[in-house]
């Protein structure tokens, strides 16, 4: 399957995609019941500035209330931005697992955290959880800024040194 710039592939729990190429397009995970806790699996993903939206719901509409979805990739090659939901005040959020990183880059963007709705000027969000793990290979992990109304949030991602990465 190939998703080019401007294109979107809706991907439900239980769906199967062994080899997927994302050339500027979007893989959007669907969680129809909005309960969170849904587990998704993708095979080998090759990305050129692709977006993998773990946080999206309702056939393209954002769901601002749930986190705790889990995405597992067999492998990642290239550069992808993963949009996730977090609930850092409760030390939890969506998680990503990459079996093999083939000189890959994972950009992490927080689509929504309940803090966004209550934040005031100069307020700091604190909390931590493991957002990403990789089995083998070379992976660069970066943070991407989110603008939510007047709020601007960029997560701090820490390499734990054991193949896992956490937000702090």
Image (cartoon, rainbow, N blue to C red):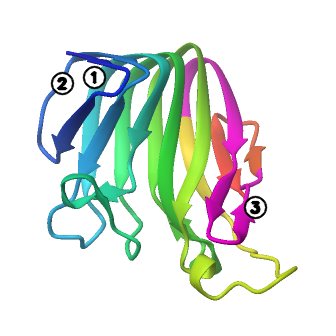
Label tally = 3
Q: CA distance from mark 3 to mark 2?
A: 32 Å
Name the mark on residue 151.
none
**Disc 1 target residue:** 43
Q: Tell whether position 103 is magenta.
A: no
Q: Position of residue 165 (x, y in %)?
A: 66, 44
Q: Is residue 69 left or right of residue 48?
A: left
Considering only order in the chain, which callout, 2 or 3, is on the residue closer to the N terminus? 2
**Disc 3 target residue:** 168
- In this rendering, the answer to whether 168 lies above or below 22 is below
Q: CA distance from mark 1 to mark 3?
A: 29 Å
Which quadrant of the rendered structure holds the N terminus? top left
- In this rendering, the answer to whether 120 lies above or below 160 is below
- In this rendering, the answer to whether 11 lies above or below 16 is below
Name the mark on residue 17.
2
Which quadrant of the rendered structure holds the C terminus? bottom right
Secondary structure beneath label 2: loop
């Amino acid at each position: 399957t190939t998703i080019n710039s401007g294109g979107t592939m809706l991907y439900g729990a239980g769906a199967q995609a062994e080899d997927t190429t994302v050339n500027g397009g979007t893989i959007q995970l669907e969680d129809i019941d909005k309960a969170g806790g849904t587990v998704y699996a993708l095979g080998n993903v090759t990305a050129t500035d692709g977006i993998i939206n773990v946080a999206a719901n309702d056939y393209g509409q954002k769901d601002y209330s749930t986190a705790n979805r889990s995405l597992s990739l067999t492998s990642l090659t290239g550069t992808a931005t993963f949009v996730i939901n977090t609930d850092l005040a409760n030390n939890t959020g969506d998680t990503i697992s990459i079996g093999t990183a083939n000189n890959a880059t994972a950009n992490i963007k927080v689509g929504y955290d309940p803090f966004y709705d209550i934040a005031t000027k100069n307020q700091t969000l604190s909390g931590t959880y493991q957002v990403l793990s990789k089995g083998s290979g070379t992976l660069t992990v970066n943070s991407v800024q989110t603008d939510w109304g007047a709020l601007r949030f960029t997560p701090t991602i820490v390499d734990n040194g054991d193949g896992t990465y956490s937000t702090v």
